[in-house]
Image (tube, rainbow, N blue to C red):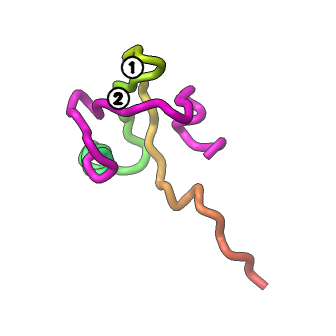
């Protein structure tokens, strides 16, 4: 999402997440469980990513992802 924390932190489509808080992640489920284990919305999430064959470090503040979902219109 263009308004999401990953975009604001400079992550790009195609970046590959290798680690969350120093722990290797191999699937979306691993990623989510590791992020959730760090705490609730607002916690800092340290990531190691690969972009163009270069490892990079990023720190992103987590949010409640429901805040990014489109809500139905109320009549």
Q: Is residue 17 above or below residue 74?
A: above
In the drawing, what numbered circle is on residue 49? Answer: none
* Residue at 46% from the left image edge and 22% from the top image edge: 51
Query: What residue occupies the far top of the structure in this picture?
Result: 54
User: Residue at left 22%, top 33%?
Assistant: 24
Return the residue nearer the eye: 37 or 31: 31
**Range of residues picked out in magenta:** 1-30
The answer to whether 61 is drawn above or below residue 33 in the figure is: above
Residue identified by numbered label 2: 46
Report the front residue among 15 and 43: 15
Residue pointed to by mark 1: 57
Does residue 17 show up magenta in the picture? Answer: yes
Give the vertical position of 37 relative to 54 (above or below): below
In the rendered image, residue 29, in percent from the top left (x then y), is placed at: 29, 53
Q: Quadrant of the C terminus?
A: bottom right
Mark 1–mark 2 contact, CB under 8 Å? yes
Q: Residue at x 35, y 29 (%)?
A: 46
């Amino acid at each position: 999402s263009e308004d999401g924390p990953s975009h604001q932190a400079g992550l790009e489509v195609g970046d590959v997440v290798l680690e969350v808080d120093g722990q290797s992640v191999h699937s979306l489920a691993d990623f989510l469980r590791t992020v959730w284990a760090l705490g609730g919305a607002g916690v800092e999430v340290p990531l190691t990513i690969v972009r163009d064959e270069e490892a990079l470090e990023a720190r992103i503040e987590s949010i409640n992802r429901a805040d990014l979902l489109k809500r139905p219109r109320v009549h």
